[in-house]
Each structure stands twice: as structure tokens, then as C-alpha cells.
Image (cartoon, coloured by chain):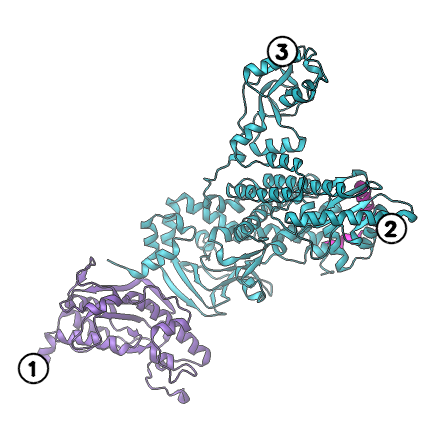
Amino acid sequence: MFNWFKKNTHPEFWKEYLKTFKTKESKKIEETRFIVFDTETNGLDIVKDRILSIGAITVLNNTLDVADNFELYLKQNEFNAETVEIHGILKDGNLLKYTEIEALEKFINYVGNSILVAHHAAFDIEMVNAALKRMNLPKLKNKSIDTGILYKKLKGKKNKHFNLDVLCKEFNIPKHDRHTASGDAYITALLFLKIISKLKQERKVNYSDLFRTSNKEGLI
Amino acid sequence: MKNTISERIFDFLKDFPPFDVLNKKQLFLVSSNVKVTYIEIGKTVFQQGEIPHENFYIVKDGAIGLYRTIESDEILVDICDEGDIFGLRPLVQNDHYLMSAKANEESILYAISVNILKEIIENNEKVNKFLIASFSTNIKTPYAKNNNGKLFANIETLEDNNGNFSDFQTAEYSKDPVTCLKSTSIKEAALIMSSNKVGSILIVEDKNPIGIITDKDLRLKIATGFVSINKKVIEIMSSPVITVSEKITTAEAQIAMLKNKITHLCITKDGTPNSELTGIMSEHDIVVLQGNNPSVLIKELKRAKDVETLKYIREKTSNLLNGYIEQKIPIVFVSNIISEITNAITIKAIELSLKEMKKQPPVKFGWLALGSQGRKEQLLVTDQDNALVFQNVPDENHQETKDYFISLSEKITKKLSIVGFEYCPAEMMASNPDYCLSLKEWKHQFNKWITIPSEKSIMMCTIFFDYNLIYGDLGLVNKMSKSIFNSIKSYEIFLNFLGKNALINPPPLGFFRQFLVEDDGENKDQFDIKSRALMPLIDAARLLTLSHKVKDKNNTIERFQKLIEIEPQNNDLYLMCIDSFKILLRFRTEQGIKHKDSGRYINLKSLNKAEKLKLKGCFKPIKDIQELIKVRYNLSQML
């Protein structure tokens, strides 16, 4: 009873978000809506540090839909001068900025039940989860894919661990707008498509293969 | 709201037509609605006959091949690379796809909704023009009358025409010429000139110009005491005068002066000597108009006493060429002027060499320029190709005569090499005993090449047939030409061999990508504009004029013009060939100037979109004229 009551205190957008998971989605890669995203943060500490911006783009049927992209900057109380050099976001720039609560609401509305894709996804997802926790909300329910792990499924890459720059080079992706959330999301999206394409050349790739975290190559 | 991804796409599109003519708001609307698609190598974007997608495509990275399947043959029609648009026509015309699009390399495409573009097309005349133009370059259309000029329409809309056309402007001239009647005395005429402070006076009869007296005449004929100052002007005037029409351009005026070796042109109402005099143009008027002046160079050449002066003038000629190309002066004028200078340098080199010889030439001879110089298409300094013909002599004198001309040729070719025309690596020079022959020997040589055609002899023919007499006896050369036509007449299959040779280099369709994968050699990533684009046109023009027994034309453009006269039914095709040739020749010259080389190999990556489109447009006429040759000479079996 208490639990039920507590759940009901969740804001409207969260209820809507949960509803999207009730519909049964296709299990075909071509019909699945992926949201490739990246967060820029002022540090790597999930508890202490904050999200500065979120960039994301939709991938459906091998295509990035620019009209359906997401780019948003957050107001900050915490400010770490050292990381400004990397991401270029100043505490009071001229950009339109949202509070963490506003930003998360927009992001949750945007992603719905899509599959989240990011390079080293665990970190970005944890940053979002940490923000949700500050709003007394549970963690994200979305399935997720880490392009870093996906890359390891390729032949001969099992024990490789590369950052985005190195993979861009390997996959011949121009590094425009690197270290902006949107730029990195765009780059990661292309990387995502190219890795899947390469995987498909090597073997048959099923929807479920994308999510295996351990590399059970022999079983596929 | 900031949109980094759209901005990035905006930045890419803004460099490529037709997006480059959109305003910021329109382009941003396009950019923020792009769908980015990744296509694996070998995968299809759309199939021939398919109902069109909602989007058309622009290649961001990679290369897409457009294929047309006819019966069971799949033919590569075009290759689209960075910045190229494809799949648009069916959307605009509500038609099915005429071709299939397949990724020749892994590619990233921007798909753009046609509905967004449709609005823009309606409101933007320039975009509209571009699209019409690009349809006509991409899609096979016969040279229908109503399509005339549209092949290159895109270029006109893209290129800024702000160049300084000083040579192409109507030339400035004095509209109030100083004149006298033929009954005037020389003294009176000189007084009139002095009081008007002019260097020349025109003698008129019924308002028509009949002669001219210049300061030079007074100096040479009067001051020397040869003619009395009391005589009538008619005694010393130069007559007839060279007349031109009021609309003459500076470049045309220069050529007229060069050709006639004069310094003044009379302007008359209709351009003939039999109409009213309206003005006079002096060399000085032109010098004033443009600092760098070919007539001045020719004059300096005539005064030249040593090869160093020739070299200096050749270098100045290069500056002149640069200026002309920069100013976008029509290439035909440019090649005429440069050829005149090159010929004048050669003549001077011959004259200087003759002076060095201990004896006068034993018999008449002719110095022939071959290849591009012979065709008057040599703009940049390249290798020298030449030959010498001398009058037949009795057998006992032959060796002695030949030795004389070889040693003369050695002097001439050496001078030319000092000037900057390097020795021909294949030794196609008059100093080579094989190409310093008597008329009889030449007739024999040509006959052998024609009747025993081998790959090598055909190649020799293509070089030697474009000869042009630079110095010496025209009679010898005419006899030579006549004998060539006789040989061909008795052995007509030779033309088929020549036709086969003309098809050796098919134009690379959408070569930009194809070429890259084709070639890994020293010139990887580079396009050989000479053998792939210029030579096919040159070869075709030579072959077709030869088959019509046209003797006096060896310039490619003139050959095509002659062909238009002979075959009016092919008017449109030949006009296209002329246009293509002009564009390609200018292109090669521009590249040569830019990279300080022969301009033969073009780095495709250094070309912008408009330049690439321009080149692509040139390939269609090449393809079509090769088809014509293939059919006419029944070459399908021979190939």
C-alpha cells in the first residue's frame, strides 16, 4: 500500500516513460529505434560530478535522423574549471540552459523505450541515473549497448579496449565537434552503424547479439 | 536552440551546388531535416524501376555508382562522390528510378526530403537552373535543339563572371583620325601630322581609306632623300590598308596586326576597305590598354640577335599567358597569340642558325612543327616535336645535302631547347636522320606508315599528320600533303586503323572515383587530362577531316568547324566537341600554370565541385563522338 502510494508520487513524465515499456517492440535491428547519446560532465566521479550537456541522435533502419536529435545544456552549481578546456562549456555561457530537473524530464521524454547506445555507455547511464536519484527517481529502464563492447565482438578485437578517437581513425569517421555531447553522439552513431555492418560481414547478427556483454563468440 | 549536428551538415552543404545559392534560413531548414544514411559497399540505395523514395541523396563520404540495366547488361553510367546529388530527377518528375544506385565504396549519404527542396526550387531561380543543368549532364539526352547550351548552363550560373575581359572588350581607338587626300604633298601631310601630334596620317578617297603614311615612312623614304618632299603622298603611302570593323576586340586587333606585320588598323563602317573610314587603331592604343603586349614581344623577337633574347621573350610570354588565363580570355584567342609567338621564336631560331651555317642551304627546305605546336594548341612550354623536308636532289648529292640539313637542325633544336622547349624524349626532331628527309623520302615514309599500319606507325601518323610549316617552302609541303591523301585513297582501310586508334582512350565515366581505384602508379589520384580527354577529341577531329580529304586544317577547333560545314546533320555534336575542347584546353593550361608543369595530370582532390562538374560535362561529347566513329568505321569488329 505504501509502495503503491510512493510510486504514484512520481511525476507525470516518469509515468509516461514507464508506459512506453508496456508496448511490445520489434526484435529486428532494422525496426528498432536506437538513441545514441553522450553526456559531457565536469568530471568522472559519478556522485560528485554533474552533467553539463546531453547530445543524442536517433538511429532507425541504418539512418540517423537529424530532425530527431537532442541537444541540451544544463545549469550548474558545481563548476570544475579544469575540464572547461576539454568541453568548452563555461559556467555562464550564452547558451540556453536548463536545470537538471528540466533537462532530465526532456531527455526521458525523448528516449522513451528506445535502446540507448553510447561509447562506454555505463558511465553515461550512471551519470543520468545519479541525476535521477537526486530527483528521487529510480534508474533508467532502457536496454543499452556499449559501442566499446560491441567493437570487441569483432574478430580479433576481443581484448582490445579503445577510446573513441582511436576507433574513429580505424573506422574512418571524421572527428568533427569532438568533445561536444552532440558531436560525440553523432560520431558514436556512425561508429555504431559501421561496427554492426562489419559484424554482419563476419557472421549473422541477431538483435539479441547486440546486448550480450560477455563475448561468447563460439556460441553465436 | 543550439543544434551542433545541423550546423555541421550546414557547413558541408554550403560548399556544394545547388545548396551554395540558398540563403542561410533555407539551408538551415534543409540541414536540420537531413537523414544520415550509412551504406555498406555493394549495397543498393535504390533499384532501377523502383518507385522513388521521399528523399534524394547527396554523397557525404564514399562513392555511389549509378547503373542502368538494359536487358541483362548492367552498365555503369556515373559515379557520384563527395557533394554529388543523385536520385532527384524521379522525385521532381514523379517518375520511377531510371537507374540503380549502388555503393562502390562504403558511403555516408545525406538524404534530403524532396518536399523541402520543392518549396525552395519554386522560390529560387538559380537552384532551378542548376537542377535542369545537372539533369542534362547526368541523363542521356540526344543533342536536341531545345537542349542547346544547357550542358554547360550549370557552369555559367556557378562561375562568377567578374573577370576582366580587357582583351575581349571592344578595343579603344581614335575616332577622329587625321586624314588627307591623295593629291596632298608629302610636306603638307607631314605638317598636318605635326600640328595634330600624331605618328600617322590616312589617305582617303571618297571617305574610304586607301593608304597610310607613318613616321617610319617619313624616316625611311623622305629623310634618306629617296623621295622628294614635294611629291604627292601617294608616292610613299603603304597601300592597301588593313581594315577592320568597329566591333573588333583588342585580341582580334592584335592578331590582325601580328598577321599582317603592321602597326595600324583602319576602322571602317562595315570593316571592308570600301566603306567610310571611322577611326584608326595603333599598336600604341593597345599597349596603353594592356601593359603586357604580344605585338611588342614579336617586335622584340624580330630584333633579337641571340638565343638569350629568345629565352627572355619566351619567359615573358608565359606571364602573358598567365594574365590571359586569369582574365578568362577566350582560349581560342589565347592559343592563337601564343602560337604566333612560339612560331616567331622558332623562325628566329632558324634564322639565327642559318646565319651560323657556313653555306647557304643547297636546296629549298621546309621546317615543320608537329603535334600540338603544329595544331597551334600548345600553350604551355612542352617538348619540341619537329621535322624537316628538303627538295629532292640527285642521288650523288643526297648524303651531302642531308648532312647539311641535319647539322642545321641540330643548331635549331639546340636553340629551342635553350629557349625552354625541351628535346623530345622520343627524338621526334628534325635533327634525327629519320625525320630530316627529302620530299621523296617523306612520301615513301608516309606511304609505308599508311599501307603497313602497325601500332607504332599509326602513332607516328597521329603526330606527323598535324604538321604545320613554320619556315621555308610551302610548295614542298603541299606536295607532301597531296601524297599523303593519295596514299590514303589507295588504302582506305588505313582510316579504320586510325579510327581504332582514336578509341584507345575512352572517356572515363564519372572518372573521379573510378580513376582512383584504377591507377596505383606514380600519378595515383590524378587524372590524365591529355590522354583521357584532349587526345580523344584531337584524334577524332583529325580522323574525320582526313576522311573528308580536308587538307589545310590542322587545328582541332578549326577541324570541327570544317566538319560542321561538311556534315551539318552533326552540327550539335561537333559544337559540343568544340565547347568541350575549349574547356579542357583552358583547364589543362590553368592547371599547368598553377602547378608549374605540363598540366597533364590533375589532382582531383584539388578541384572544387564546379570544376568537377565542368569536366564531367566535357565527357559526354567525347563519348558520343567515339560512338559516331565506332559506327562510321565499323569498328565494333575490330575492337
Which residue is at the front of the view, B444 or B314? B314
For residue B572, which quarter of the picture? top right
Place of residue A118 in the rendered image (x, y in percent of width and height, measured from the top left): 30, 74
Q: Disc 1 designates what residue?
A: A2
Name the residue located 25 percent from the left edge and 75 percent from the top edge: A124
Query: Which of the two discs, 2 and 1, sits closer to the camera?
Result: 2
- Residue identified by numbered label 3: B188
Compared with B158, A218 (above or below) is below
* Quarter where residue A166 is shown: bottom left
Going by the image, does B396 lie left or right of B546? right
Magenta-colored span = B476-498
Judge if badges 1 and 3 mark residues of a common chain.
no
Residue at coordinates 66% horizontally, 31% vertically from top-left?
A: B261
Q: Which residue is mark 2?
A: B399
Residue B121, image x, y percentages? 40, 47
Q: Does the magenta run of residues contain B147? A: no
Q: Colour of chain A?
A: purple
Badge 1, how many Cα within 10 Å: few under 14, some, many 20+?
Answer: few
Amino acid type, residue under disc 1 in the picture: Phe
The residue positioned 23% from the left and 73% from the top of the image is: A20
